[in-house]
Amino acid sequence: MKNETRCRKQTGRSLTSKVAAGMIGLLLAGTASSAQTFSNGFRPFTGVPRHYVCYQTSGNIQIDGNITEGAWEKAPWSEDFKDIEGDAKPAPRLRTRVKMLWDNQYLYIAASLEEPHVWGTLLNHDTIIFQDNDFEVFIDPDGNTHQYYEIEINALNTVMDLFMVKPYRNGGLAMLNWDTKGIRTAVHVNGTINNPSDTDKEWTVEMAIPYSALSFFDRNQRPSDNTLWRINFSRVEWDTDIKNGAYVKQRKPENNWVWSPQNMINMHAPERWGYLLFTTQAHTDFQLPAAEEAKPYLWKVYWAQQQYRQAHGRYANNLAMLQIPEKQRGSKGQQYTLRLEATSSQFNANITGTDFSGAVYIDQEGKVYHNSK
């Protein structure tokens, strides 16, 4: 679920399939505009991202879709998925949850998708999988909202994967020619697929994602103890009717259920994704790094700058023009200092704090990075 090659979730529920297909063609042809499109997608996130503590495994995990083997029994389940818009929408009628493990080569993901009617139609790699019910993974290893990955899979174990240099809102294009080289996936159906005459229980997904596939630009993305990634999961669920012994999608938007709610219908806002903490310790409590707690103040600057540019045709030169104080105080008493440099077409803001070293930066494309001292 998202607007990956469809680009249809930017501001509303959905576009028609015909329009979505047209958008897909533009993106794949590389002719989409690189200019930013101002929308509520720039609005600062007021929710609290979920987190998952991922334990290291030494056992050999067999990727067969059966997630009841010993190693998985030791991994905790995530919270149940919610609607992508969060508590403002009804809770999903079907349960979805995930669990994760890691070793020196792979991030392992297991997912359980409750489903009384398991179906699938798409068989070709890199076809647009969200046209079927699917399970989707979004990974931003360094958490800067740029250079992230998306992997989709349906109940037939058909995979679509892509790489994003930057989000669509910043002119990013979906690179469908990127493949998760070395990925291993499997699906197990607890029931029968494409058989409307019976009632199924669930389908389960198992993935082994190699870090080598995520190591672009000579950057080694292999985690170690206490490494923190941003990650999220989405489930697309279409309402169907049974006609002439076959499943037929209803003419209505799909359901979008996610692990960590985005509070808008758009998965391509990586700053809203959940946190994945890798650990080698048997019992680890999650604690949000102090620099992460400062980032929402930068997103307020980003949102205000987009508003200002829409109104005035340029970015503001200073914080006063945005009516944002330089000095900020966090919810735990932290003291922050904001700074802003800008030209008419670019800006760079940073924040320093009393509880972390260095500074955290954001630019006009929403790229966030921490320059620690």
Image (cartoon, rainbow, N blue to C red):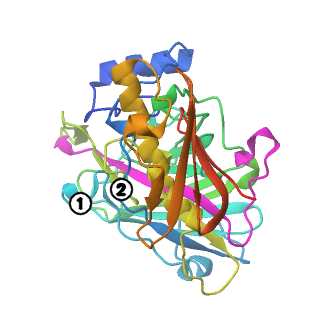
Mark yes or no: residue 58 visible. yes
Magenta stretch holds residue 226: yes
Is residue 234 rendered to the left or right of residue 227? left
Disc on res. 325? none
Residue 16: quadrant of the picture: top left
Image quadrant occupied by the N terminus: top left
372 or 188: nearer the eye?
372
How many residues crowd around disc 2 within 10 Å: few (fewer than 14), some, or many (20 or more)?
A: many
Residue 284: quadrant of the picture: bottom right
Query: In x, y percent, where is residue 264?
Result: 31, 45
Is residue 190 rendered to the left or right of residue 221? left
Give the farthest residue toward the right.
218
Task: Name the residue at 71% across, 54% down.
Answer: 210
Q: Secondary structure at mark 1?
A: helix
Find disc 2 in the rendering and name its residue.
261
Image quadrant occupied by the C terminus: bottom right
Task: Name the residue at 23% across, 54% down.
Answer: 197
